[in-house]
Image (spheres, grey):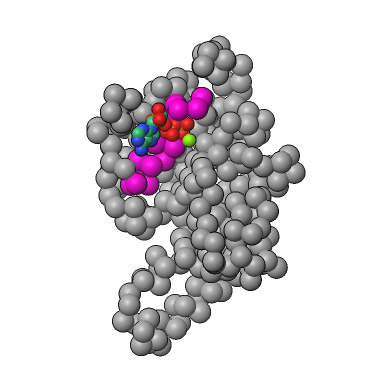
Amino acid sequence: MNSKAAILTVDQLSKSFGGVKAVNNLSFSVTQNNIHAIIGPNGAGKSTLFNLITGVISPDQGKIRLLNNDITSLRPDKIAQHGVSRTFQNIRLFPDMTVFETAFIGTYLFTGGKLLPAILRTKEFRKKERQAKERIEEILQFVGLWEMRNEYAAKLSYGNQRRVEIARALATNPSLLLLDEPTAGMNQKETKELMQLFTQVNKQGITILIIAHDMHLVNTLSDQITVINFGEKLVEGPPEVIHNHPAVMEAYMGR
Ligand code: ADP
Ligand code: MG
């Protein structure tokens, strides 16, 4: 496979809420195996873009393709089956679930979530369940949470809560991982450690699309940056092109 192929293509995408054009005729593509950053001021439409890609909301116009599949307006679970997973801007964890249980949710996509085999505990079901548990152990080791697997996820430090979300997302075996401001509110140490984790995730062949504000993080981490403002694409390019770009400076200073 051509490693320069696009994994995600967004084509003339638009979405309005009332009179607000949250995403406005936006086109861009994400190259396979890249870390691709989306930056832009508050209200620029970044989270809306993620909601459109993951099928939480449907666009008014435009197309979204994953490799050669049109995933526009598919149900979120179908899009997840195509290999798209995400974390949310505001961490979403269930208060009564342990780290292990939370990460395990991500595997339901593959254990099928079918009721009858689960009740009967068929041999096939038990095999899949065992494999899923092994996979979760691997993932929790990878994100550095294995020792905390039996603790309540929502009781952990903010940085570790984010790791739980990332573990849950990885458990769906994504080829494309969307991270919505994953380091917002983190201290410097947590930010640095999460950046290292993202690099490791990316090395496993997972393409990352990340929304971030921290320019140091964006410049260090990403191969490609798309700047959006008022739902439209402003500039695009590698960090050296985006850095100190006049239009970018203006977008950030002007609002
Ligand atoms: P960003 O993530 O870049 O800060 P958002 O995508 O959250 O921006 O929001 C873009 C614009 O769309 C904002 O003006 C916001 O108020 C509006 N918006 C987002 N989601 C909704 C919604 N569900 N209903 C109404 N307006 C929304
Ligand atoms: Mg947002």
User: On the image, which quarter does residue 186 sit in?
Assistant: top right
- The residue sitting at 45% across, 22% down in the picture is 229
Using the rendered view, name the quadrant where residue 17 is placed.
Answer: top left
31 or 255: nearer the viewer? 255
Residue 185, position as x, y percentages in the image = 64, 40
159 relative to 248, above or below: below
Give the residue drawn at x 33%, y 25%.
20
Range shown magenta: 41-56
Please tell me which residue is depicted at 46% across the width and 55% down the height of the picture.
174
Q: What x and y, as percent, mark residue 254?
A: 53, 13
Tell me if 20 is positioned left or right of 5 in this view. Answer: left
The quarter of the picture where residue 12 lies is top left
Q: Is residue 105 left or right of residue 19?
A: right
Point out the residue furthest to the left here: 61
Most extreme residue toward the front is 95
Q: Note whether 185 is above or below 159 in the view shown.
A: above
* Residue 236 in magenta stretch: no
Ligand 1: give its quadrant. top left
Left or right, 68 with respect to 181, comes to left
Q: Residue at x 73, y 39 (%)?
A: 188
The front one of 158 and 105 is 158
Residue sitting at the far right: 189
**Residue 200 can be seen in this image:** no
Q: Give coordinates of residue 102: x percent, y percent.
A: 53, 64
**Relative image position of residue 211 (x, y in whole percent):** 52, 36
